[in-house]
Amino acid sequence: MRDPKTGEYSGFFSELCRNFGQNVLKVKVEFVDTTWDNIVAGLQSDKWDLSLALNDTPEREKAISFSAPATDYNVSLAYNKNNPKIPKGAHTIAEIDKPGVTIAVMSGTAQDKAISGVIKHAQIMRLPGNDETRLSLMSKRADLLADANITNMLLTEAHPEWAVAIQPNPPLAQQEVAFGVRKETSAADMAVLNKYVSEQVKSGAVNRLIKTSVQAMLVTDK
């Protein structure tokens, strides 16, 4: 996530990238603003070297390559627990896929594709970024926010007084999340990146970064 006041990026994948650049490659890491609609195209056109937190999908594998997975992904739906439109204890898509219900989602993302494939009756509100989707839920323009399970976990941990999330059963759009790299990246460079990611996962460092991200979000929101 990007802090709207400072412009600084935070979150476990940002930290994973910083650690890789500074401690493995010994280079300064620079983050480039983009949108999810352009995150693959920018990589292909050499605007940056790594794309962060990309879902490894067959469609994307046609255009770019992926590192070893850092974590798993699925789609959850955050909502205000006081919203009368959402049944208490809801855990299926059918329970919220009703006329008059609005679901916010970031345009062009895996969660956009996932929710578009299962929603038949509710309205989908597609917005350009994380800030916009989160604000739409907080301002009650949207009833639910379809987002990555980890991102929605940050939201619900930061706002326990009103925010809860539905984890659909069965899981929606279960995938692996990794760094995206250009197709022409050498095997040697891929081996360095994959070794780093795998070691961070095995050592528990990724899980610690996720927990740290949650705590940082809680402090920021106080």
Image (tube, rainbow, N blue to C red):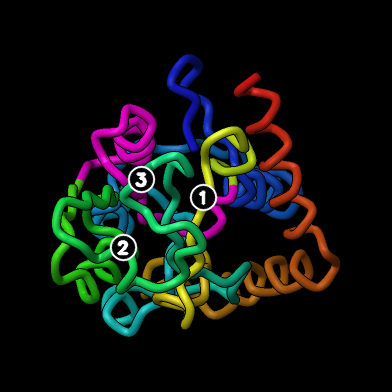
Element type at marker 3?
loop
Q: Nearer the viewer, mark 2 or mark 3?
A: 3
Which residue is located at x 47 percent, y 57 percent? 88
Instruction: Please tell me whether residue 212 is drawn above or below residue 46 in the rendered image.
Output: above
The residues colored magenta run 127-153
The C terminus appears in which quarter of the rendering?
top right
The reply to whether residue 50 is in sight is no
Return the residue at label 1: 151
Q: Nearer the viewer, mark 1 or mark 2?
A: 2
Query: Three-letter amino acid code at disc 3?
Result: Pro
Q: Earlier in the sequence, mark 2 or mark 3?
A: 3
Membership of 96 in magenta stretch: no
Query: How many other residues sit within 10 Å of disc 2, few (<14), some (14-19) or many (≥20)?
Result: many
Return the residue at label 3: 84
Disc on res. 159: none
Query: Three-letter amino acid code at disc 1?
Result: Thr
Which residue is located at x 32 percent, y 40 percent? 133
Query: What separation in Å lies between label 2 and label 3 (alpha carbons)?
Result: 11 Å
Instruction: Using residue 71 as the reference point, say whether residue 19 is left or right of it.
Output: right
Disc on res. 96: 2
Name the quadrant containing residue 136: top left
Query: How many other residues sit within 10 Å of disc 1, few (<14), some (14-19) or many (≥20)?
Result: some
Q: Earlier in the sequence, mark 1 or mark 3?
A: 3
Membership of 136 in magenta stretch: yes
**Residue at the top extreme of this rendering:** 5
Query: How many other residues sit within 10 Å of disc 3, few (<14), some (14-19) or many (≥20)?
Result: few
